Image (tube, helix red, strand yellow):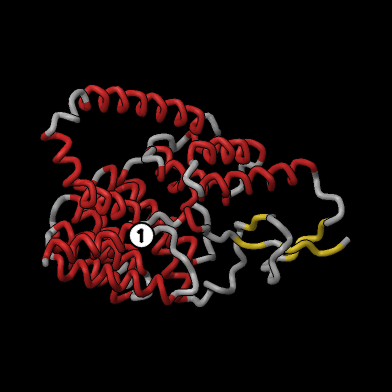
Amino acid sequence: MIKNKVITYSAISFLAVTNSSLAQSSLLELQTTTAAQGAMQSGVSSGSSLQKAAADKMQEKKEADVFQDLSSNPKFKSDSTVSTSEAIDQIQKTLLFSDKAAAQKLGNERKSSLVINRAPAVDKPTVDIMIDDNAPSKSSVQIEQKQKLAYNAATSGQYEVAVELYKQILKSDPENHYASFALAACYHKLGQYKQAKTLYYQLLKHEWSDEKTKSELIGNLIEVIVEESPNESVYLLEKLVNQSPESAYIMAGAAMAYDKINKSDQAILLMKRAINIDPKEIRYKFNLAIIYDKLADYQNATRYYQEIVQNYISSNTIDNSIPIEQVKQRIEFIKDKIQ
């Protein structure tokens, strides 16, 4: 018997969808506006309304099918219809608990209850578990293999494939919080917000010792809320801003809610506050650049776009949530436009 190495949950690249996906959609809209207008004028878009209606209907059926499958799991059945106010209330509870824990200096002393047995290739284990490395169970090997396949599918944009794989993992291992978070992120990427919100909400009920993972989870849930109910979310997020004035991701979420309802001045103010709190978070600058771009404030938009590119060049890590090539193209487009 030897000691196997285990790790606490750690968010992977595609899980951190916080705020950036909304901005990416806006950037894509800005890039394609001219082409779309030209197509409409030439009659190319004839019949597109019917096509869109048919596609929307198919999407609604698909969402209903996958949600039925998800809600059949006893773990999620009781919370199959999570409201925006319920989600915000859970975020408030989580933040209040975090504040109390920090005040008592327990943040780094408590052991995480969310420990995932993954590949034994980590140098610094956080918890020691006595198992026989030479005799892994067949089911654990299968789960590990599916988890790798699901991860590869998700990071390559094959979210439907990843969803099916993560659902299979959870069927065999319902307490696999890594898979639950990843499944929620995939639903989120697919625009299936009801399913994503249910999973984020359930995961948030657990005790998280890893502040980064918890912030990613809260940020993702806020983005879903903003996308689903922007007007309602503005009021509720203002309460969170007042409760947690030093939380950058809460500020950023509220900013995106205001941007969603076309209150750009408030959106800019809050996004700048988020940047001041966490200047290293490049996604906040990306969102701010998009807001300025939509307002045709090209000077400020270019300033933040260039900061993003410079950060990308100088950084040793790659943030896949930022479409860097699209940002570069947008900078060139703006230069041509204002000359």
Can residue 235 be seen in this snapshot?
A: no
The residue lying at 63 percent from left, 48 percent from top is 148
The residue lying at 85 percent from left, 63 percent from top is 2
Give the left or right position of residue 115, taking residue 329 as reference.
right
Q: How many marks?
A: 1
The residue lying at 50 percent from left, 33 percent from top is 70
- Name the image quarter holding residue 6: bottom right
Q: Amino acid at mark 1?
A: Glu
Mark 1 packing: few (<14 Cα in 10 Å), some, or many (20+)? few
Can residue 266 be seen in this snapshot?
A: yes
- Name the image quarter holding residue 67: top left
- Name the image quarter holding residue 36: top left
Tell me if residue 58 comes above or below residue 188 in the rendering. above
Give the left or right position of residue 181, taking residue 94 as reference.
right
The residue lying at 75 percent from left, 46 percent from top is 141
Q: Nearer the viewer, residue 194 or 189?
A: 189
Give the left or right position of residue 179, taking residue 266 as reference.
right
Q: Position of residue 179 (x, y in %)?
A: 57, 47
Tell me if residue 123 comes above or below residue 183 in the rendering. below
Which residue has dot 1 on it?
Answer: 325
Q: Nearer the viewer, residue 326 or 287?
A: 326
Q: Position of residue 134 (x, y in %)?
A: 86, 54
Q: Nearer the viewer, residue 23 or 113?
A: 23
Q: Position of residue 186 (x, y in %)?
A: 46, 44
Split into 4 quadrants, where in the image is the N terminus?
A: bottom right
Q: Nearer the viewer, residue 94 or 37?
A: 37
Q: Position of residue 339 (x, y in %)?
A: 11, 67
Tell me if residue 194 comes above or below residue 48 in the rendering. below
SS for tag 1? helix
